[in-house]
Amino acid sequence: MNRKIDFTNKYKSSYHDEDNNNNLFNRMVANIKDLYPGKLTFSIEESAKILSISPQFLYKKIQTGNIEALSFGDRKLINIEILANLLTYGVN
């Protein structure tokens, strides 16, 4: 006996729920602030460590425009909210 189950409307992942994502984003900001009190921007190396990725991958994503970074001369810094956004939503 073949049965077809339609999951399209009945089961939505809470991961895509905007309220949950906003809540998760706010928790990410709070967690980063707890770990790094008073710090608003992070170096590429610090950011890569927080994101658990390599600095090279992060540089590549900045160069291609997938991740926003602040430029101070030849230094690149990433804002705390950008980090929280990456932890919440990821990057393509």
Image (cartoon, rainbow, N blue to C red):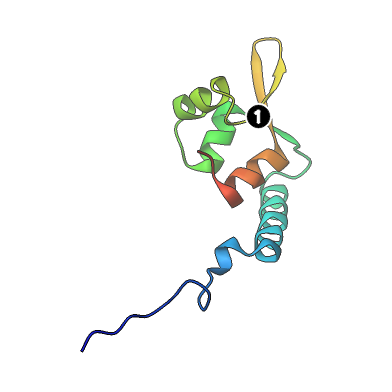
The location of residue 60, given as percent across then percent down, is: 49, 23
**Residue 39 location (% of width, % of height):** 75, 38
The correct choice, above or below, for 54 with respect to 27 in the image is above
Which amino acid does the dot numbered 1 rest on? Glu
* Residue 49 horizontal side relative to residue 68, left or right: left
Please, which residue is most extreme toward the bottom here? 1
| Residue 47 quadrant | top right
Q: Residue at x 57, y 25 (%)?
A: 62
Asked whether, in this view, residue 57 is left or right of residue 40, the answer is left
Compared with residue 36, is residue 4 higher up or lower down, i.e. above or below? below
Name the residue at 70% across, 18% down: 71
Quadrant occupied by the N terminus: bottom left
Q: Position of residue 21 (x, y in %)?
A: 65, 59
Quarter of the image where one finds residue 83? top right
Residue 53 % position (x, y): 46, 37
User: Mark 1, residues whose alpha carbon is within 10 Å: few (<14), some, or many (≥20)?
Assistant: some
Residue nearer the viewer, 33 or 67 = 67
Q: Nearer the viewer, residue 80 or 1?
A: 1
Tell me which residue sits at (33%, 80%) in the image: 4
Frontmost residue, 36 versus 88 = 88
Judging by the rendered image, the residue that carries numbered circle 1 is 68
